[in-house]
Image (cartoon, rainbow, N blue to C red):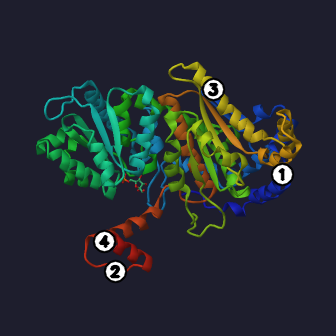
Amino acid sequence: MALPNINPTTTQSWKKLTVHFEATKDISLQKYFAENPNRFDEFSIQWEDFLVDYSKNRVSKETLNLLEELANEVGLKEAMNAYFEGETINQTEGRAVLHTALRVPEETQIYLDGLDVVPEIRAVNAKIKTFCNQVISGEHKGYTGKSISHVVNIGIGGSDLGPAMVTEALEFYKNHLNVQFVSNVEGDHVREVIKTLDPETTLFVIVSKTFTTQETLSNASTIRQWFLTHAPEEAIAKHFVAVSTNEEKIAAFGIHPDNVFPMKDWVGGRFSLWSAVGLSIALAVGPDHFNALLHGAHKMDEHFKITPFQENIPIVLSLLSVWYNNFWKAESEAVIPYTQYLRNLPAYLQQGIMESNGKGVDRKGEKVNYQTGTIIWGGSGTNAQHAFFQHIHQGTKLIPADFIGFKTSLYGEQEHQNKLMANFIAQTEALMRGKTLEEATEELNSKGVSAEEIKRLALFKVFEGNKPTNTLLIEKLSPESIGKLIAMYEQKIFVQGVLWNIFSYDQWGVELGKQLANKVLEDISGEAIAGHDGSTTALLKHLKN
Ligand code: F6P
């Protein structure tokens, strides 16, 4: 069974939504709130330790009903079944999409081509646990008999962003290991990391699903060469481990089979932190916290699977996002976590969301005639307030935003927490409420500003308001809640791909640049420069002169 194949714009609900949009687009959020004292109750979801308030969105119950109708018409339920049952929903690569299997409880059975995939997942998980415990306890020794103090994850894209973001997010839960990440092919980046390392006490984790990625293999080779200037060849076995699907290539690189943590091709790179790709996370926080992360993600999967659409967090967030993207023509979405621990969540989501849904061909193989993938950006609050919030408040673009906050701080600095939460809540209120010309005038007046000055300044101080936001208020930042949060966005990606009738799990769009880079590299390293346009030829000449 493949995914349904329905152009959303041909559905009845899409047509109704178009009419509904025209009829309701001038209703302000202020009006929605004024007219309905129960708006928060009707437009929020409380699930476990998550409170999702989506009442500050430009929607009515009718909007949501129509969006739900759209989800039904494009076959969302059917698509969800195909996804969770391991059908080949990544049709252009001929693969199932089963990262959700990586976090199921032990007793679960998930069949792919007649084989239960769970026992192998458990076996890899057990290997991760044993290895991490040995490294963390100091039992695993380096080539001179010293324990490991530093870990370097060598990978890029999904083999870097997920592990790096989660390791940073779980800093509070970290052990003594110093975990760093090398991703870019830039030699200076590698050298800056190497500079801080002692070969006797460092463990290198080479992570590459394909084990063919130029950046990762170059960085791994450079680091290996550097390592061998200090240590004998046999020491490699104690200091290099690899995560990949490509066992042949790992062997060719000289990694001992015992040091290989395998993964499956049905795990997409940007959804892989739950697999052995998460080894650096497990090393950083220990296997118990890593398992709690998986457990949290599984809980979100279950919520997603069984909850009616309008109480279903990832589905509601997806529907709202499609509403803004396709009817309001919003150009981007912001994600603003009010915690420094999640400062790299927007960067992580950029790969997850934009590599998945930045597609222009539908599941029929035809060019789409509507907008797909959202552009994601953001930064941590309150820093972001002093950077780009001006644009959200008073710019000309509509930028729906997710505000993510945690009720409890980890160190109990309550005064700080109160200020952080005050900003967190005040911003969504300000974005919704705005400030009228009368209010701005009155404010200036009360400060004793002259009438002439008020006339000159008042308009600059007006806030239109009416800016949509979702507020996600989570009890506490923990491995489990972070697992839930990431899985929530993963499922949002899936739903949006279904609504837009595109394939979310391939990434052909990154191939052309890779191919051309190989050709350009030949021209940089060789004598002749051939076969390029005028600009590229001139740039190459300039580089080589
Ligand atoms: O950027 C393209 C991509 O294939 C990503 O999808 C992937 O996460 C990244 O490259 C790294 O790939 P690999 O893990 O195979 O080295």
Q: Amino acid at mark 4?
A: Lys
Which x, y percent locates residue 263? 35, 46
Identify the residue shown where x is 50% and y is 28%.
478
| Residue 544 tag number | 4
Count of marks placed on residues: 4
**Residue denoted by label 1:** 24
Answer whether residue 458 is visible to the viewer in this image.
yes
Q: Is mark 3 within 8 Å of ligand 1?
A: no
Give the class, few, some or many, for how many residues have Cα within 10 Å of label 4's Cα (few <14, many ≥20): few
Secondary structure found at label 4: helix
Q: Which residue is mark 2?
A: 530
Q: Earlier in the sequence, mark 3 or mark 2?
A: 3
Of the numbered discs 2 and 4, the one sitting upstream in the chain is: 2
Q: Nearer the viewer, residue 26 or 460?
A: 460
Q: Nearer the viewer, mark 3 or mark 2?
A: 3
- Determine the CA span between mark 1 and mark 3: 36 Å
* Secondary structure type for disc 3: helix
What's the mark number on residue 419?
A: 3
Image quarter hosting the C terminus? bottom left
